[in-house]
Image (spheres, helix red, strand yellow):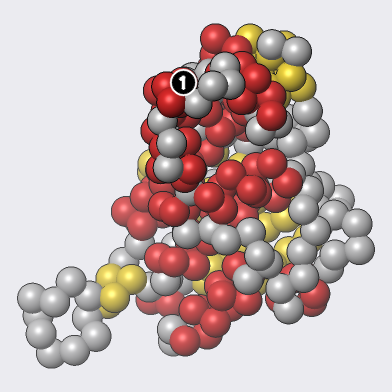
Amino acid sequence: MSTEIGIDACDFFYFSEFYRMVYGELLADITINKVSLLENLKLAKDNHLTLAGLLLFGKQVEFLKPQFCIKGTCYINEEEFWDKEDIGGKLFEQQKKGVDFILRKLRRRQINKDFNAPGELEIPALAIKEAIANALVHRDYFINSSIFINIFEDRVEIASAGTLPNTLNIENIKLGIHIERNPILLSFMAKFPDTGYTGRGSGIPRMLRLCQEKNVPLEFINDVDRQQFKVIFYRKSNQN
């Protein structure tokens, strides 16, 4: 998807570091110019950043495309909140900040008699990390809506724009079946080691396994009426 945003909106320092880390080369050492390189990687077209290029490597994404950021809210009850945060930046940054927002709100439970031990999070951090990555990569970018992280006393919800594409349903994503709605985003997110994202369809089964191991109920809702896909982690500390 193309944009009207020029190449100068690309954070070339950030892109250079990414390129060096992933491909083992410095941009200064390759013969192709930067614009052609971005176009070859499907990050630019006709001297404008594609949407993927902007979201992955753009400057000030939250100002240029604020609808494609994350809105995090921590609620006292269903109608009142006590903390909220607008999470912007490149997709890699959005994932990290989104995960951090949730982790700061979770409780820890003492799992042995060592009072000085850090305790165990009520929801596995790796499952949350996977859920945020999936929301960023697989959401429908034709819908102008943010990703919403809603934290309640009894659950954590991550809602992204768009329902499951084509023939996918809840049962087959649990088996690892996936369709690539945003292949460029998926490809680059999988290359960035800090995301923990592989792009091989193993994320949902891994989330299920992690939550089952810790006895954390996990629910997926494909809401056709609201054009929204929702992941719900039920908070372990409130279970009887």
Q: Position of residue 62 (x, y in %)?
A: 52, 23
Q: Position of residue 178 (x, y in %)?
A: 77, 64
Q: Is residue 88 above or below residue 202?
A: above
Q: Residue at x 60, y 12 (%)?
A: 7
Kind of residue at badge 1:
Phe
Residue indicated by mark 1: 12
Quarter of the view holding residue 126: bottom left
The C terminus lies in quadrant: bottom left
Q: Position of residue 163 (x, y in %)?
A: 80, 53
Q: Residue at x 43, y 26 (%)?
A: 29
Viewer-closest of 96 and 74: 96
Q: Is residue 157 visible?
A: no
Q: Is residue 50 above or below residue 17?
A: above
Q: Position of residue 202 (x, y in %)?
A: 63, 71
Q: Is residue 102 above or below residue 170?
A: above
The N terminus lies in quadrant: top right
Q: Helix or strand or loop: what does disc 1 sit on?
A: helix
The mark tally for this picture is 1
> In screen coordinates, is 147 left or right of 150?
right
Q: Residue furthest right?
A: 167
> In screen coordinates, is 13 left or right of 130?
left
Q: Residue at x 42, y 71 (%)?
A: 124
Q: Residue furthest bottom?
A: 113
> In screen coordinates, is 173 left or right of 200?
right
> In screen coordinates, is 200 left or right of 179?
left
Q: Is residue 10 visible?
A: yes
Query: Counting other residues with Cα less than 10 Å from the Cα at mark 1, is it few (<14), some (14-19), or many (20 or more)?
Result: some
Q: Residue at x 72, y 55 (%)?
A: 229
